[in-house]
Amino acid sequence: MKQKDIRKKLKEYGVLSRSICPEEKESRIEKLLLMEPTLYTRGSLWDFILEQAGYLERYCLIWQILWMLLFLILVQLGGMQLQEKESREGVLVLFSLLPSLLVLLTVEEITKVYQKTMLEIEYATKYSLKSVVMIRMAVLCIFNFLILTAGIFWGNMFAAFNITKLLVYSFTPVILIMGIMLKLMQYCQGEILRNAVIGGYVLMAALAVFNYVKQLGWYRPESFRIWCMVCIAGAIFALRQFVLLNRKLTNCEYILR
Amino acid sequence: MLEKIIRKYYDEIFRYCYHHVESSALAEDLCQDTFVSFIEHYGRYRQEGRTRNYLYTIAKNKCIDHYKKQRPFIMEKVPEQEAGTCMEEEVVVKHMVMCLPEELREAIVLRYFQGLKYTDIGAILKISSSLAKYRVKKGLELLAEMEGGGHETKGH
């Protein structure tokens, strides 16, 4: 018998077997549903946060530790270079680029929750999709914000550089990337989102290098006001996207219910 | 919602179990065990993929456990119930599939009996979709050889 015939027979058997149904289906499902009440025992908020933090993949933690080491090296070596006019711009470019890398490293951990059919699991479990997404975002954002701020303050100890400027230079790209990420999260998920963020990051890096090579002067004192404006605009944009995402998740819950 | 999930996938998982065992009563037991495990362990589920694939993975493990307990398992004859429903030729095909090596059999069952996509088969068997495709192809080759050389039933 040729493979083609075998395939045909297999398919035919597959179709025929679809008519076979379990005889005791209803009684068995009822038994299964008796187990259900044990599923809905909610823990405290703290338990929930710890539980969700525990779901974060180990690779995410490893990347963050590696990032921290890289950032500490930048702070230690670059901090001193900030005082020298010639190398200042290069160090500031790194201070702008490196923090946004954190967003890229953690975006997948949040979007994983977004997988379409995973909604079913979430709804069979104790918490809503929205609460899971929000808590994961909060855990990662707070952790990243703390290590970033601590790193910048520590770096400032090595160089008497204006701390406000350093914060703005570092956080503006982070806020912009976060805003874009929140926007993308409303429309795409998983791999597509990650590739989009990587693309955005590469573009930003290319722009920064272009600025450094061509001496566009983004880090001149007179440009600082523009940085502040971009930072505020970016924060408003990110906040708006956060609200929209929140609304979308609420709608999502409504549809599922 | 849990009820919805159970109802949505119960028949499909039952049929998957049915393709691995010789009686529908046994398949119902395995299906029941699958959902019990699902309910017991869903809290530890790391939420990385489709619910359906997760259920298939549990069912696959249940069937493997069943094989281990049943060894040596020899399919000697066509079950009466099936033979009486004009499905004899198809049942022979099923028996041939059951004689395939475990990894090829799984791929064939999921692809042709359950009608899944290669990406889903890959996710369930924890292999790449291209390897799933390769296993299906290899399984078909073996089935063709079996048919050509006369079908002999073997143990799992």
Image (cartoon, rainbow, N blue to C red):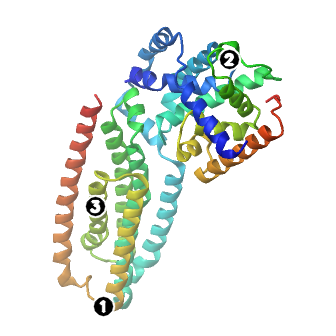
| Circle 3 or circle 1, nearest the eye | 3
- Type of the residue with mark 1: Gln
Q: Position of residue B79 (x, y in %)?
A: 71, 16
Q: For numbered disc 2, what is the local secondary structure? A: helix
Corner quadrant of residue A11 = top right
Q: Which residue is mark 2?
A: B83
User: In front here: B154 or B6?
Assistant: B154
Labels 1 and 2 share a subunit: no
Which residue is found at the position 35% from the left and 66% from the top? A153
- B147, above or below A161, in the image: above
| Circle 1 or circle 2, nearest the eye | 2
Q: Which residue is mark 3?
A: A180
Q: Residue A215's mark?
A: 1
- Type of the residue with mark 2: Ala
Q: Residue A69's mark?
A: none
**A102 to the left or right of B124:** left
User: Are circles 3 and 1 on residues that touch, CB within 8 Å?
Assistant: no
Bin the neighbour count of mark 2 within 10 Å (Cα to Cα): few under 14, some 14-19, many 20 and up.
Answer: some
Q: Chain of mark 2?
A: B
Which residue is found at the position 30% from the left and 38% from the top? A130
Bin the neighbour count of mark 1 within 10 Å (Cα to Cα): few under 14, some 14-19, many 20 and up.
Answer: few
Label 3, label 1: how many angstroms apart (C-alpha)?
Answer: 27 Å
User: In front here: A122 or B126?
Assistant: B126
Q: Chain of mark 3?
A: A
Which residue is found at the position 81% from the left and 23% from the top? B74
Quarter that holds the C terminus of chain A:
top left
